[in-house]
Image (spheres, rainbow, N blue to C red):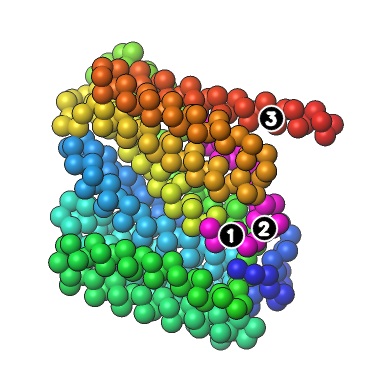
């Protein structure tokens, strides 16, 4: 992903039916997410919610291992389709009629995928999920072919993207004919192929992309996943509230909100845009790592949903399983956030020991639920290590502000 020199001129007045799809300026000022990108993200809420809801169901039914594998597989399809659109739009968003219509096709693919999530996770029927995913990826082939036509400087790169994506989609369709065990192996082979396409396509001439725009887009999707987790927890708590608010309800509702708020605070401590501009060579891995951040935040919402469900009726899953279903996603989020952002912000690297200590405490609290610690109290206790990390960041920011004043 290297710099480019071509730029799209600012548009004003009437909107032409078609605008040449040439590379946008990587230093374009005031580059922000467009209304179309925001609408595109909102369609993914449906898919994220469907995946998280099915994960919560499998945890409650004590089928967490099977449910987690299916969840991670579905979430890859959601994340990879979103990420590819995001990076393409950062380089080639012409925002004309053809671009909007192809984006509409991708949004339709998201909804097809979301509709197929229950069948995929409960019945191992991946037909609808695969069809929805392929619709989104074929739409990207169309976008790359258009970019190849309009942008001679990056034509070879665009052609490699289009060819690589198209070939892998044939593999996804063929995977539907495989038996279950072979299908899982095929999934991981195809994932490796999908991840390799951008590396292969950009080995000589990378596409243009705007660091502030990319950082904002990932931040906005983080907000969307956090919002879905809040909504899922709220829906799950509603029956408990209707039955009568008690201490356990307050602990779960308050503790869950604090956990999600703490995750928001730690992720948005600083913008990654400056770091990405200074270290463009790290962009691939920074973006790839967000698969874990997004999946962990959605899984946290699923864990909190199961905790709320426990307040209303008995579930098959043990208290210990539910405790870990909350603690582990928080740990994954913390570790990945620090791992991805530390190379872009040296101040974070000095806090690694605190992050590891916080994760150890979180796991310890979850382990305590296996020997009698009530899960609602465990959720509240998990707020403490996250709160300490937030306090450390606030203290450091205050100190830096005084030094620079």
Q: Residue furthest front?
A: 353
Tell me which residue sits at (53%, 58%) in the image. 285
Element marked by disc 1: helix
Q: From which residue to which does the magenta span run? A: 262-285
Closer to us: 62 or 355: 355
In the rendered image, residue 332, in percent from the top left (x then y), is placed at: 43, 41
- The answer to if 343 sits in the magenta stretch is no
Question: Within 10 Å of the Cα at label 1, are there few (<14), some (14-19), or many (20+) other Cα atoms?
Answer: some
Q: Nearer the viewer, residue 105 or 273?
A: 273
Q: In this orientation, does residue 33 appear?
A: no
Residue 123 relative to residue 298: left or right? left
The residue depicted at 84 percent of the width and 31 percent of the height is 405
Q: Position of residue 399 (x, y in %)?
A: 74, 28
The residue under label 1 is 283
**Residue on which disc 2 sits:** 279
- Distance from disc 2 to disc 3, alpha carbons, whole Å, reads 23 Å
The secondary element bearing badge 2 is classed as: loop
Residue at the spot of label 3: 396
Q: Nearer the viewer, residue 135 or 327?
A: 327
**Which corner quadrant of the image does residue 111 belong to?**
bottom left
Between disc 1 and disc 3, whose residue precedes?
1
In-front residue for pair 220/95: 220
Name the residue rendered at 54%, 61% in the picture: 284
Q: Quadrant of the N terminus?
A: bottom right
Mark earlier in primary sequence (2, 3): 2
* Distance between mark 1 and mark 2 Cα atoms: 7 Å
Q: Please name the residue shown 43% across and 26% down the image.
A: 361
Location of residue 119 with respect to 174 vertically, above or below: above
Label 3's element? helix
């Amino acid at each position: 992903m290297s710099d480019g020199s071509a730029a799209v001129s600012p548009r004003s007045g009437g909107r032409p039916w078609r605008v040449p799809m040439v590379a946008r300026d990587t230093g374009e000022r005031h580059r922000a997410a467009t209304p179309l990108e925001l609408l595109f993200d909102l369609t993914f809420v449906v898919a994220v919610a469907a995946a998280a809801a099915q994960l919560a169901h499998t945890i409650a039914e004590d089928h967490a291992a099977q449910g987690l594998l299916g969840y991670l597989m579905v979430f890859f399809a959601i994340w990879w389709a979103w990420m590819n659109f995001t990076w393409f739009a950062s380089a080639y968003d012409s925002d004309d009629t053809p671009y909007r219509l192809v984006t509409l096709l991708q949004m339709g693919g998201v909804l097809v995928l979301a509709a197929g999530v229950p069948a995929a996770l409960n019945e191992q029927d991946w037909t609808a999920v695969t069809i929805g995913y392929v619709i989104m990826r074929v739409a990207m082939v169309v976008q790359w072919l258009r970019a190849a036509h309009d942008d001679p400087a990056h034509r070879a790169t665009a052609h490699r993207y289009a060819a690589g994506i198209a070939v892998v989609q044939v593999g996804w369709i063929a995977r539907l004919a495989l038996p279950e065990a072979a299908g899982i192996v095929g999934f991981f082979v195809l994932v490796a192929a999908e991840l390799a396409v951008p590396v292969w396509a950009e080995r000589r001439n990378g596409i243009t992309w705007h660091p502030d725009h990319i950082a904002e887009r990932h931040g906005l999707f983080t907000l969307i996943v956090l919002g879905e987790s809040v909504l899922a927890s709220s829906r799950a708590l509603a029956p408990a509230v209707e039955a009568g608010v008690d201490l356990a309800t307050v602990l779960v509702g308050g503790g869950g909100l604090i956990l999600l708020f703490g995750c928001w605070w730690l992720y948005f401590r600083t913008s990654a845009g400056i770091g990405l501009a200074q270290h463009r060579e790290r962009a691939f891995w920074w973006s790839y790592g967000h698969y874990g951040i997004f999946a962990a935040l959605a899984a946290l919402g699923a864990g909190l949903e199961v905790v709320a469900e426990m307040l209303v009726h008995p579930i098959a899953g043990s208290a210990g399983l539910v405790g870990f279903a909350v603690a582990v996603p928080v740990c994954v989020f913390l570790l990945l956030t620090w791992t991805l952002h530390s190379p872009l912000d040296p101040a974070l690297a000095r806090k690694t020991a605190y992050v590891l200590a916080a994760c150890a405490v979180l796991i310890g609290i979850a382990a305590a639920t296996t020997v009698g610690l009530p899960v609602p109290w465990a959720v509240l206790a998990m707020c403490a290590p996250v709160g300490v990390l937030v306090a450390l960041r606030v203290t450091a920011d205050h100190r830096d502000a005084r030094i620079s004043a």
